[in-house]
Image: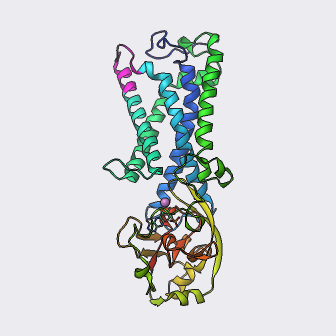
Amino acid sequence: MRFPIPHDPPVTFKARLHDARTATAIGRWLGLAVVVCFVTGVLSHYLQHPPHWLADRLPPRPYWGYHLTQGLHVACGTAAVPLLLAKLWAVYPRLFAWPPVRSVRHALERASVAVLVAAGVFELFSGLLNTFQWYPWPFSFVPVHFALSWLLLGSLLLHLAVKWPQIHAHWTRRSPGTLALPEADGPDRRALLTAVAAGVGAVTLTTVGQSVTALARFDLFAPRDPAVGPQGLPVNRTASAAKVTEASVRDWRLTVTGPRPYTLTLDELRAMPQYEVTLPLACVEGWSKSARWSGVRVRDLLDRAGGGPGARARVVSLEAAGAYRVMEMGREYAQDPLTLLALRLNGEVLSLDHGYPARIIAPNRPGVLQTKWVGRLEVA
Ligand SMILES: Nc1nc2c(c(=O)[nH]1)N[C@H]1C(S)=C(S)[C@@H](COP(=O)(O)O)O[C@H]1N2
Ligand SMILES: [Mo]
């Protein structure tokens, strides 16, 4: 059975391997990476910015959930870079097909491919630069990266529908209709795909150690080495960047507001029952590191202020300005026994860069919500 390719003359690709089989073989891996990025990205977005009805229902378990999903997000996005380059190489002669437009349907198809390529390139490179905390653009990263992910998914689905004949032919191992090339291309194709796989393996192996501790020693190119930093943990925003100084925390007191507000000194906090938890700090940029934290349970602090078993919290940092100064914590997190106002890290008093005198650590939450330099806790 032959699968006629809509609107294509018998052979569009003149050079070897710029053919539908190669494009499909690379495309399935690229498509898989994009779908994993999309699913984990949407998850990350709603963990950080939950709609009202979801805020109190987000699950704190598994405690390693965000470490896994965000590690996957960044690893698949990184792996997708060589895949996208290989895919564009395989299909680029088609981008210059002549005549450029043969029919209304062909024009629409080309327009959808233009959107797909533009959204794909933008998502991968903006994400990659974000892992390096480099923002050479005037817009804010999160909303634009999030919005374009929907555009990318939509244009990917449209593309899959349009290319269904080739994809189907590939999966059923039949020759893809009029684009069939001589079997002699087989070894070349295998060599190309092996090279692409080796490229993907290399970028993955040399970066994924930022999230997978067992592979840390191969971590050559990741922007962060999770083992490097004060107290064995990296610092994203330093105390000096946040304008928090030794002097500004000297007379520190924790203020807890609610039906029965109170304040506590650091010594009074240390006199309360202390708990130790081992939880990862999982940054949205893809690095994660587990650490031992100890301190006071947030739910004990909320209870004491008269917050009932359903209380949620708002946490305010001493930091004067900054996107992560105020953090909302839904009920499930606030009441979780693993959620601490941590005073110690890996057996030592928190360093100023890690949030001294007190910071939040909660299970299954993005690093951006693990607020440092906590000044006030509000029963919300
Ligand atoms: N007040 C405040 N807390 C903050 C931040 C911040 O900018 N301000 N950055 C967050 C981010 S993005 C991460 S990944 C973690 C990093 O914690 P660490 O510096 O202790 O490793 O802290 C979080 N807590
Ligand atoms: Mo982060």
* Total numbered badges shown on the rendered structure: 0
User: In the orientation shown, which residue stands out farthest toward the right?
Assistant: 214
Judge whether residue 257 can be spotted in this image: no
User: Which quarter of the figure is the C terminus placed in?
Assistant: bottom left
Name the residue rendered at 44%, 37% in the picture.
120
Instruction: Name the one closer to the observer, 246 or 380.
Output: 246
Q: Which residues are magenta?
A: 95-110
Q: Which image quadrant for residue 102?
A: top left
Rendered location of residue 18, percent (x, y): 51, 18
Whether residue 97 appears in magenta in the rendering, the answer is: yes
Question: Quick check: 249 above or below 367?
Answer: below
User: In the orientation shown, which residue stands out farthest toward the left?
Assistant: 138
Rendered location of residue 215, percent (x, y): 66, 50
Residue 9 left/right relative to 270: left
Instruction: Name the one closer to the observer, 363 or 368.
Output: 368
Name the residue rendered at 55%, 17% in the picture.
17
Whether residue 232 appears in magenta in the rendering, the answer is: no
Rendered location of residue 92, percent (x, y): 44, 22
Name the residue rendered at 44%, 75% in the picture.
314
User: Which quarter of the figure is the N terminus placed in?
Assistant: top right
Instruction: Name the one closer to the observer, 2 or 139.
Output: 139
Rendered location of residue 268, percent (x, y): 54, 90
Question: Quick check: 319 above or below 284?
Answer: below
Report the coloring of the rendering. Answer: rainbow
Name the residue rendered at 48%, 9% in the picture.
10
Judge whether residue 115 can be spotted in this image: yes
